[in-house]
Amino acid sequence: QGLTIEDEGVERRVEAGFIDILARDANGVLTVIELKAETAKPDAVAQVLGYMGCLAEETGEIVRGFLVASDHHPRVIHAAR
């Protein structure tokens, strides 16, 4: 709740790749949303963090991230904690 789309429906390109969805939360914080159709594997965590790092460097803003998947590998769950 409170997210607004920033990328106008087009994947945002950063040095680390293409961000599935870029939004801002209710407090104006940039939010990376990475979508996985199946189980999110550990490399997806590095992918999201890479996107977040690129955006933080580009904008000088705080960035947060979400990894949305039908399931998450146990290492992904541990990393998120």
Image (spheres, grey):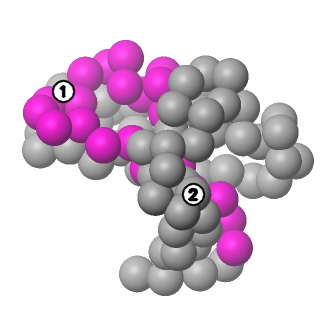
Q: Quadrant of residue 35?
A: top left
Pinpoint residue 64: horizontal percent, then vertical percent. Answer: 59, 52
The kind of residue tagged 1 is His
Closer to viewer: mark 2 or mark 1: 2
Which residue is found at the position 47% from the left and 25% from the top? 47
Which residue is found at the position 55% from the left and 24% from the top? 17
Q: How many angstroms separate mark 2 from mark 1 (CA)?
A: 28 Å
Q: Which mark is residue 61?
A: none
The magenta stretch is 28-48
Which numbered disc flags the more N-terminal residue, 2 or 1?
2
Which residue is found at the position 75% from the left and 53% from the top? 62
Q: Which residue is mark 2?
A: 7
Number of numbered discs overlaid on the protein picture: 2
Pinpoint residue 39: horizontal percent, then vertical percent. Answer: 14, 31
Q: Is residue 3 left or right of residue 40?
A: right
The kind of residue tagged 2 is Asp
The N terminus is located in which quarter?
bottom left
Is 40 covered by the magenta stretch? yes
Q: Which residue is mark 1?
A: 73
Q: Badge 2: few (under 14), some or many (20 or more) residues near its Cα, within 10 Å?
A: some
Pinpoint residue 61: horizontal percent, then vertical percent. Answer: 81, 53
Q: Give the vertical position of 55 relative to 33 (above or below).
A: above
Q: Quadrant of residue 28?
A: bottom right
Q: Quadrant of residue 71?
A: top left
